[in-house]
Amino acid sequence: MKNQFLLLQIEWKKLRRSTILLISVFAVILTAVFVFAADPNRYTEHVGWYMDEVQPWSIFFLLPSITALFGSYLICRETEDDTLKSLRLIPIHPARLTTVKLLLTFLFALVLSLLLFTITCLTELFLHGTALSFPLILRMFLQYLSNGIGVFFAVSPLIAFCAFRKNGQWAALIVTEIYSIGGLFAAISDPYRTYYPIAAIFQFSGYYPATLKNRLLSVMILISCGMFTFFFLWMCQKCKREDPHHILNMI
């Protein structure tokens, strides 16, 4: 556990030298501004509508692609920077290092989602003041928190597929954006809303009303995405022990 925390600290220090964090924060702020600018009168007149409306916009167009870019960048960076050989000289298990990178990606998705919540909540407080009730704030907080969790699990297979390719982070960004927009159409009808991972996030978080059965099915879909990701990465690490370049032919 101590080694995991140390690896997490090392990865975080590496990220501080990268611009990806600043780009992500800027994208979050830009999304919040864009949604509000689209219909400011409605958000000014109705309590909670702004916090509600930002959720689908962020999930269909922002959070999944940014999370996939971040996660695949963390994993494939060692290969692109040619530090993979150096890491083999250090007694660090590759699977443990990959797990730390995925954990950091999970935290990244949570932080971005909660940053959106903070921006929208402060805006609502400025517009409506005491009219914004605590139960509404708590409900929205739980939804945004669940959104961050769901986004990570929904895009984790794409992170795994793209991470071992050259410039895989950009492939992950493009593919995930298409995958996320597909959720916009899947969310229209009930069967796809339950089984399509991006659309399933809304039932998992409670944004869409759903029966207990459908909500549990959506949770199972998201968990299955995470399990597949860890299995795939485990297979990749197993292949890389024999041949570092074999994984490119396997995908």
Image: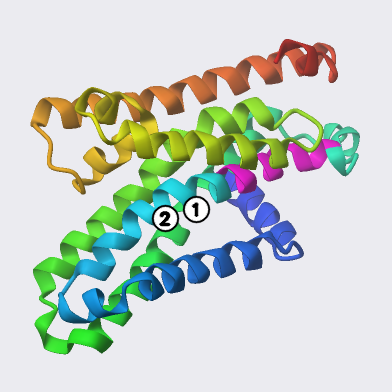
Q: Are marks 2 and 1 in contact (CB under 8 Å)?
A: yes
State the image coordinates of residue 133 (x, y, percent, origin top left).
10, 76
Q: Is residue 116 magenta?
A: no
State the image coordinates of residue 131 (x, y, percent, origin top left).
10, 83
User: Which numbered disc covers residue 135?
Assistant: none
Point out the stretch of residues depicted in magenta.
Answer: 68-79
- Residue to which mark 2 is pinned: 58
- Which amino acid type is shown beneath numbered disc 1? Leu
Q: Is residue 77 magenta?
A: yes
What is the distance, in whole Å, between disc 2 and disc 1 at their CAs?
A: 5 Å
State the image coordinates of residue 214 (x, y, percent, origin top left).
16, 27
Residue name at image x 84 percent, y 20 percent: 244
Q: Is residue 181 left or right of residue 75?
A: left
Whether 233 is drawn above or below 25: the answer is above
Residue name at image x 57 percent, y 50 percent: 66
Residue name at image x 40 percent, y 75 percent: 37
- What is the quadrant of residue 134 in the picture? bottom left
- What is the quadrant of residue 75 in the picture? top right
User: Which numbered disc covers residue 62?
Assistant: 1
Q: Quadrant of the C terminus?
A: top right
